[in-house]
Image: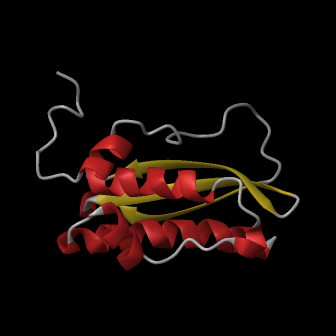
Amino acid sequence: MSAVESLPDALEPQIRALFGALDHAGEFGGSARAGIVSGEAGREDLGTRVRFSLQIAEERLLAVRYRAYGCPHTLATCEWLARTLEGQRLDALRPGKPLEWARQLGVPATKLGRLLVVEDALQAALAERDAR
């Protein structure tokens, strides 16, 4: 039985599908760091920690990677954001807010605090870009 198959049935199908294909999880390979900014938020001892790394060139978000510690909802939301934001122009970047993400993905209200950590990590990465 795979890890996804052993997840509780209470998870929404979209969360199960995203959690089963965390294609953007990890770090950028190679030694090239040009155009990469990152930001993180949360603490593992509090249950959620997220780090986003963004590769930016010519005012476009070329690629998104993340490392996350948390529940399936947290990781699925990170994956969904990476898929949604990758390739977008920075001036058109509209990541939305955690409450919107929760509604779209079927994340229960009890997990909203975890999505706030996801938002903080993403905003920290974007702020690093603005600081350069």
Can you give x and y, in whole percent of width and height, for residue 86 in the image? 65, 53
In the rendered image, the quadrant that contains the N terminus is top left
Which of the 4 quarters of the picture holds residue 74?
bottom left
- Left/right of residue 106 with respect to residue 90 in the rendered view: left
Can you give x and y, in whole percent of width and height, for residue 41 in the image? 46, 66
Observer-nearest of 89 and 29: 89
- Left/right of residue 50 with respect to residue 45 in the rendered view: right
Can you give x and y, in whole percent of width and height, for residue 17 in the image? 33, 42
* Residue at (84% x, 64% y) in the render: 59
Can you give x and y, in whole percent of width and height, for residue 64 in the image? 62, 50
* Residue at (22% x, 53% y) in the render: 12
Observer-nearest of 76 and 125: 76
Which residue of the protein is positioned furthest toward the left in this rendering? Answer: 9
* Residue at (28% x, 73% y) in the render: 112
Number of dots carrying numbers:
0
Which residue of the protein is positioned furthest toward the right in this rendering? Answer: 58
- Left/right of residue 113 with respect to residue 51 in the rendered view: left
- Tell me: residue 129, above or below residue 77: below
Specify how the rendered protein is coloured.
secondary structure
In the rendered image, the quadrant that contains the C terminus is bottom right
- Tell me: residue 4, above or below residue 58: above
